[in-house]
Image (cartoon, rainbow, N blue to C red):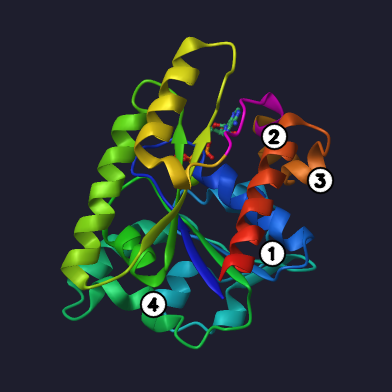
Amino acid sequence: MRKICIINQKGGVGKTTTTINLGAGLSRKNKKVLIIDLDAQGNIDSSLNLESYKDVYDFLFENAELNECIAHVGKNLDIMRSKETLTKSEIFLAAEEEEREFLLKRKLEELDSYDYVLVDCPPSLGLLNQNAMLFADEAIIPVSTDFLGMDALRKMAIAIKDLNQHFDHTLKISKVVPTMFDKRTKLSHKIMSEIQNEFYNIVTDPIRVDSKLKECPLEKKSIFAHAKSSKAAKDYMKLVTSLLRDEKKK
Ligand SMILES: Nc1ncnc2c1ncn2[C@@H]1O[C@H](COP(=O)(O)OP(=O)(O)OP(=O)(O)O)[C@@H](O)[C@H]1O
Ligand SMILES: [Mg+2]
């Protein structure tokens, strides 16, 4: 079971979009996928049709059972949603005396019925995200190919290194995914080559800018269901393939 957090402390870089479409793509390739939404804004909740009653907050703090908190959204795709109650969780976590950074990991210790668990992180480095990073073995960092993208990526890489040292953990950045790549602009190319120079072997092909992605939340569909011939569907399927390829290397 691969445990992956999709993380970047910078907002609006494509974390949620990447989580949803990676999850949907992997499930189409017959992988059993659980997405955990750790963003209190409930982005995934409003991007897909979810029916489960309980959410991540109930799971972490109210002793709700895992299966009460999971919505089945596709044949191989389950989602643990979040809603605004999760905003309280930073405060509750801060009040925990022991192992407050390890609550998610502890709660999911028994979980083994999925091939992939993808955690969509909010844009911060708070306790919830530390929980996500200490649960996960791999981090995927989406980076916007714009002005501040590189800066955010460097900061994120340092934060992961510090976290690993502090907690004696081994979270590995497995992929850096350049997003919103616009091949007509010099800036996109410049940032893309900076990313490649610094993170060469883990940088994936870019996800091109595609307005079809913006329509998906309204339609409550993944890009594969909404516009299967779009640029974004092709780019995200390439990303799925690159994850599947890693399995063979192991
Ligand atoms: N490749 C792309 N082309 C065009 N629009 C995109 C692309 N990727 C994401 N978007 C759009 O950009 C916006 C931000 O994306 P998204 O919500 O995935 O970012 P995020 O990193 O999860 O944001 P937050 O930090 O607020 O959680 C959304 O409206 C999304 O539809
Ligand atoms: Mg998001």
Q: Where is residue 199 in the image (x, y as percent from the top left)?
A: 38, 41
Q: Name the residue under label 3.
A: 225
Q: How far apart are marks 1 and 4 (CA)?
A: 25 Å
Mark 2 crowdedness (10 Å alpha carbons): few <14, some 14-19, many ≥20: many
Residue at the location (49% across, 57% down)? 83
Q: How far apart are marks 2 and 4 (CA)?
A: 32 Å
Q: Earlier in the sequence, mark 1 or mark 2?
A: 1
Q: Name the residue under label 2.
A: 232
Q: Name the residue under label 1.
A: 51
Which mark is nearer the camera, 2 or 4?
A: 2
Q: Which amino acid does label 2 sit on?
A: Ala
Residue 207 magenta-highlighted: yes
Between 214 and 151, which is closer to the camera in this rendering? 151
Confirm whether residue 242 shows in the render. yes
Q: In this view, does 44 lie to the left or right of 76?
A: left
Q: Which amino acid does label 4 sit on?
A: Lys
Q: Position of residue 182 (x, y in %)?
A: 57, 19
Q: In which quarter of the image is the N terminus?
A: bottom right
Q: Earlier in the sequence, mark 1 or mark 4?
A: 1
Q: Distance between the residues labelled 3 and 4?
A: 32 Å
Range of magenta residues: 205-213
Q: Earlier in the sequence, mark 2 or mark 4?
A: 4
Mark 1 crowdedness (10 Å alpha carbons): few <14, some 14-19, many ≥20: some
Residue 183 magenta-highlighted: no
Q: Earlier in the sequence, mark 1 or mark 3?
A: 1
